[in-house]
Amino acid sequence: MNDKKVRVRFAPSPTGPLHMGGVRTALFNYLFARKHNGDFLLRIEDTDQTRYVPGAEEYIAESLKWCGIQIDEGATVGGEYGPYRQSERKPMYREYADQLIASGNAYYAFDTPEELEAIRNQHEEEKKTFTYNYATRENLNNSLALSEEEVQNKIEAGEAYVVRFKMPVGEELQLDDEIRGRVVFNTSALDDKVLFKSDGMPTYHLANVVDDYLMKITHVIRGEEWLPSMPLHVLLYRSFGWKDDMPKFAHLPLILKPVGKGKLSKRDGDKLGFPVFPLEWTDPKTNEVSSGYREGGYFPEAFINMLAFLGWNPGTEQEIFSMEELSQAFSLERVGKSGSKFDPEKTKWFNRQYLMTKSDEEIGILFAEQILKAKGIDADQETVNRVCGMVKDRVDFVSELWEHVNYFFEAPVEFDAKTVKKGWKEDTPALVTELKGILEGIEDFSSANSEEIVKEWITAKEIGFGKVMNPFRLAVVGAGKGPHMFDIIEILGKKETIARLDYAMENIKK
């Protein structure tokens, strides 16, 4: 690490919802910044106005906030290197494009889309692939092939043009990637990318290099799909004379499909039934709703913990990490080169671990707000907390608690047929009537006291515990499920317990 203050950026385009792969890129940048006491910037790269989607920028900011990824500088929080929205930086990019033309590292290209299409078609007929590069550029409609006077006349006449980078010929670039090590590119295999478009906006390549330089970015940590762009970006730094200020590059491995090969996509989530976005997203054009981890009941800490392990490992057996622990343990050296397969079941496992570590009060409040409120049930919060604590180790999500505890809030009106067949015998009503009498005589209805008295009675009658306890559970719960029976009746209370025994005896028919 050099002596410059570490500054990293997450630079998404607002072209739709933020994919979980994008969140992971943001997370790794954030962890790296925190590890080195650096700054984490959010920059919105909205140079492609044709693909801009309303609401996408707000979605990005809200997603990062939900994940606990705090922005030090950015479009939503400000900072001394703003503006942090590229569309608001538009006037400055022209100056840098002109600088490259003046130094001979870029040129004007006047080729119309129709002209380029005709050339591509011609190459296809000859079974060749057209590339706008050193081999073709001298014969095309650009300032390398035209005289200065012709170029000037075209510009003055208002002809549309783009600015292209003049890729050097036959140069071998040996570049260092913080994750992949030495990577080698030959410039003759690369094309002359457009840097500045005819609509007056820069492309990603120009804007991101200029902004990274002006914002003093020290490390560019991004997805591996940008690895082919690395030589152009390095050459742009060199062309501007900024070689000493060039950031270190790190290209993260892909997140792969759970089944088969290739990059994880929304289609995989739709097919296999898991979200690929942090938050629910409604497409403003089609109104199609895509599921999100937040709305799916995942805790942000579990989502983040899961993402951290997609491509990185701590080198130890530890799997559960707080954000603070992640930032202390994280290093680019422990990020792998190969893609990491996403496992939806492991994600659920992470959620369960976090659910079990939360206090009964935390889970109870969530259950009351998310489930009971929606059902119109107003219950004592302390009771709700206790009930949730009794069964939280049986579920992956707060939403799944209801099927395990519904009988605490609603008396059963139907009874599980299999349990009835198995446990409700001819002599059961007589036993339940006798049990009811025992319970009515108990003044201290605490779990421990009730259990002791009922067990003494069962022992004295010399009958198996199952003969009494199975129908007892069926009558109170409606099925053969639930935690310790005497804990259940302590919470329900004597009156409710007796009422349920009466209802069962009247309504269970063999």
Image (tube, rainbow, N blue to C red):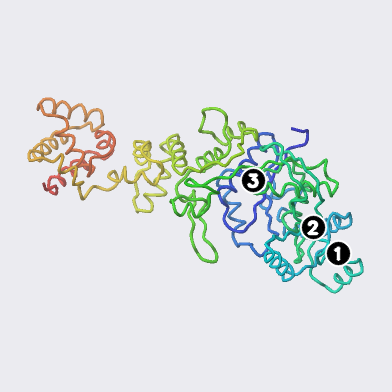
Q: Is residue 467 above or below residue 60?
A: above
Left or right for 304, reference 110: left
The structure residue drawn at horizontal position 64% and vertical position 62%, both measured from the top left corner, is 52
Q: Which quarter of the picture shows residue 102?
A: bottom right
Between disc 2 and disc 1, the foreground one is 2
**Residue 401 is drawn in which quadrant?**
top left
Name the residue: 60% across, 31% down: 329
Question: Left of 147 or right of it: where is 256?
Answer: left
**Quarter holding residue 203:** bottom right
Instruction: Return the mark for residue 135.
Output: 2
* Place of residue 201 in the rendered image (x, y in percent of width and height, measured from the top left): 75, 62
- Pick the residue in front: 99 or 436: 99
Q: CA distance from mark 2 to mark 1?
A: 12 Å
Give the SS element for disc 3. Answer: helix
**Disc 3 and disc 1 in contact, CB within 8 angstroms:** no
What residue is shown with label 1?
145
Mark 3 or 1: the one toward you: 1
Which mark is drawn over residue 434? Answer: none
Q: CA distance from mark 3 to mark 1?
A: 35 Å
Q: Amino acid at mark 3?
A: Glu
Nearer the observer: mark 2 or 3; the answer is: 2
State the mark number for residue 224. Answer: 3
Residue 120 seen in render: yes
Query: Residue at position x 17%, y 32% from top?
Result: 466
